[in-house]
Amino acid sequence: MPLNDLVAPQAVIPALKVNTKKQALQELAERAADLTGRTEREILEVLMQRERLGSTAIGSGIAIPHGKLPRLEKLFGLFARLDRPIDFEALDGQPVDLIFLLLAPESAGADHLKALARVARMLREPEITRMLRDSQDREALYAVLAMPPPVA
């Protein structure tokens, strides 16, 4: 399934300029707050709590920070391509340059896990990640995220 039901065009950041993992999470929380009506502090706290359990970097330069928020209406995604890769404490040691933030309502349960699996599956496709890294603007990035995943 394409990811355009999780991420809106205005939730795509083509060249996020950050130097650290914490800075990246702060910037993403700020952008997500603008689009969800939740506070930046509330979002950042949920993301930092999750990162304390272990890095959400899944390898190959990709991270999927995520968490559940009270009073969030529906699943929310935000995609950012970083201006330059940063250390995200990935198990494979690779710096991260593609980040998909996923926020879910507290009551989401299995829907949160299914969405997380969908994002991970799509971002593990080498052709998808190549296109995301090669895309120059928000529209092109969104078009890649909206593509149906390749058939296995």
Image (spheres, grey):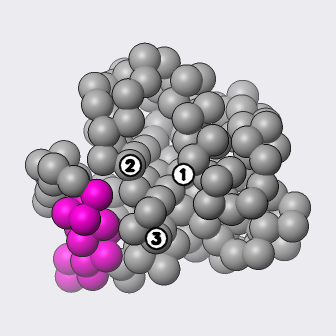
Question: Residue at the spot x=79%, y=37% of the render?
Answer: 41
Of 40 and 118, nearer the camera is 40
Where is residue 152? Give x, y as percent.
21, 78
Query: Which of the marked residues, 2 or 3, is nearer the chain's N terminus?
Result: 3
Q: Is residue 41 something one can see in this rendering?
A: yes
Badge 1 amino acid: Leu
Decide which of tag 1 and tag 3 comes sooner along the chain: 3
Residue 101's disc number: 1
Look at the image and give the residue range highlighted in magenta. 138-152
Q: Which residue, given by chain and number where applicable, does mark 2 sit on? A: 13
Position of the N terminus, as image quadrant, is bottom left
Residue at point 38%, 22% (across, down) = 86
Q: Nearer the viewer, residue 106 or 83?
A: 83
Among numbered discs 1 and 2, the one appearing first in the sequence: 2
| Up-down relation of residue 122 to residue 82 (above or below) | below
Query: From mark 2 to mark 3, how far is it between C-alphas?
Result: 11 Å
> Does the image show residue 125?
no
Q: Of the numbered discs in the image, which one, if any, rests on residue 38?
A: none
Q: Residues within 10 Å of mark 2 (few under 14, many from 20)?
A: many
Which amino acid is tagged 3?
Answer: Ala
Whether residue 89 sits left or right of residue 15 in the image: it is right
Residue sitting at x 70%, y 75%: 74
Image-quadrant location for residue 10: bottom left
For badge 2, the amino acid type reads: Ile
Residue 5, position in %: x, y?
48, 80
Q: Are marks 1 and 2 in contact (CB under 8 Å)?
A: no
Q: Within 10 angstroms of label 1, few (less than 14), some, or many (20 or more) residues?
A: many
Residue 125's image quarter? Answer: bottom left
What residue did someone put label 3 on? 8
Residue 121 lies in the magenta-colored region: no
